[in-house]
């Protein structure tokens, strides 16, 4: 075991700056971000396909060498994860973007209004706009964010009424590592990118966060309450996010 760790440290990992270690994954230098928390009971790992980095969460008492050994055992999985990640998808004229789970073609013309409009075209839903062509992507994202707020607020109102909870403050951002969160101060934060997901996926995330207003953990009591609140299949929603979530994160980067 000791010889194995020495090999990992000497041949696969480097840390010239004294910061996060770096692991060689099939010729690519991938940083390893290590986070220790008192809540962690074991080592867990996430390969961030967007930032091209590995994130390790581990107990405060666990040695760094244990994290590095964990990475070594999972190197093939990490390589596959990074290689199969979707490419960044810019938005522009004639590209497509999802809105509430439905693909919309972006139709740009100098004769169109600068304001984004939803139109049902001959081949399906479209988003029409004018203005400078080079700003199309930025304006589509701004429109999606604006459309997200009232939809998210309506969903929160629905689940809070069902749960008998006061309606919390809503914050909308663009986190890379989570779709939503609920703070003890009474704020639910959501990724604007959920507006691109199907209805049942978005509502599952929001019901999940409303359930946290009663149970600030992931205990059996939390999941029982979550399933009582959410009318759909949370496992199906989780599977959709697992399959398509990274692609949503790559849009407009």
Image (cartoon, rainbow, N blue to C red):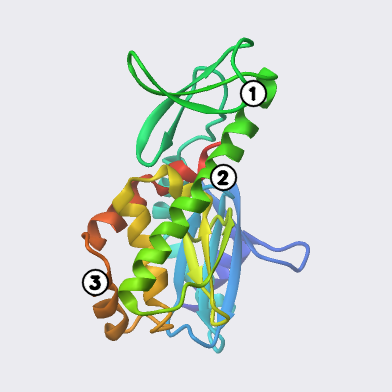
Percent across and percent down for residue 64 are 58, 77
Rendered image quadrant of residue 155: bottom left
Mark 2–mark 3 Cα distance, whole angstroms, equals: 29 Å
Circle 3 is placed at which residue position? 227
N-term-proximal mark, 2 vs 1? 1
Name the residue nearer the viewer: 143 or 141: 143
- Please indicate, yes or no, whether residue 253 appears anywhere in the rendered image: no
Tag 3: Cα neighbours inside 10 Å, few (<14), some, or many (≥20)? some
Image x and y of residue 175, in percent: 57, 57
Please tell me whether mark 1 sits on a helix, a strand or a loop: loop
Q: State the quadrant of the C terminus.
A: top right
For residue 29, above or below residue 180: above
Q: Badge 2: few (under 14), some or many (20 or more) residues near its Cα, within 10 Å?
A: some
Confirm whether residue 175 shows in the render: yes
Label 1: how many Cα within 10 Å (few below 14, some 14–19, many 20+): some
Q: Secondary structure at mark 3?
A: helix
Residue 102 left/right relative to 91: left
Q: Position of residue 150 (x, y in %)?
A: 49, 52
In the image, is residue 48 above or below residue 61? above
- Numbered label attached to residue 114: 1
Q: Which mark is residue 42?
A: none
Alpha carbon of mark 2 to alpha carbon of mark 1: how far?
15 Å
Left or right of residue 117: residue 154: left
Q: Which residue is mark 2?
A: 146
Image point (45%, 38%), residue name:
86
| Mark toward the viewer: 1 or 3 | 1
């Amino acid at each position: 075991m000791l010889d194995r760790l020495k090999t990992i440290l000497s041949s696969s990992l480097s840390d010239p700056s004294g910061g996060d270690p770096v692991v060689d994954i099939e010729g690519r230098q991938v940083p390893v971000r290590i986070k220790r928390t008192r809540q962690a009971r074991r080592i867990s790992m996430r390969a961030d396909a967007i930032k091209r980095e590995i994130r390790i969460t581990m107990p405060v008492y666990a040695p760094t060498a244990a994290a590095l050994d964990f990475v070594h055992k999972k190197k093939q999985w990490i390589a596959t994860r990074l290689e199969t990640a979707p490419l960044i998808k810019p938005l522009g004229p004639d590209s497509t973007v999802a809105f509430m789970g439905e693909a919309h073609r972006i139709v740009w013309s100098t004769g169109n209004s600068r304001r984004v409009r939803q139109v049902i075209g001959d081949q399906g839903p479209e988003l029409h706009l004018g203005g400078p062509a080079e700003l199309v992507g930025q304006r589509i994202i701004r429109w999606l964010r604006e459309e997200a707020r009232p939809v998210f607020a309506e969903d929160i109102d629905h689940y809070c009424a069902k749960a008998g909870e006061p309606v919390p403050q809503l914050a909308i951002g663009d986190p890379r590592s989570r779709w939503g969160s609920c703070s003890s101060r009474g704020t639910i934060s959501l990724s604007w990118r959920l507006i691109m997901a199907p209805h049942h996926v978005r509502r599952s995330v929001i019901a999940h966060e409303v359930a946290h207003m009663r149970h600030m953990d992931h205990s059996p009591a939390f999941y029982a309450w979550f399933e009582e609140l959410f009318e759909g299949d949370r496992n199906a929603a989780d599977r959709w996010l697992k399959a398509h979530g990274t692609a949503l994160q790559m849009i407009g980067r």
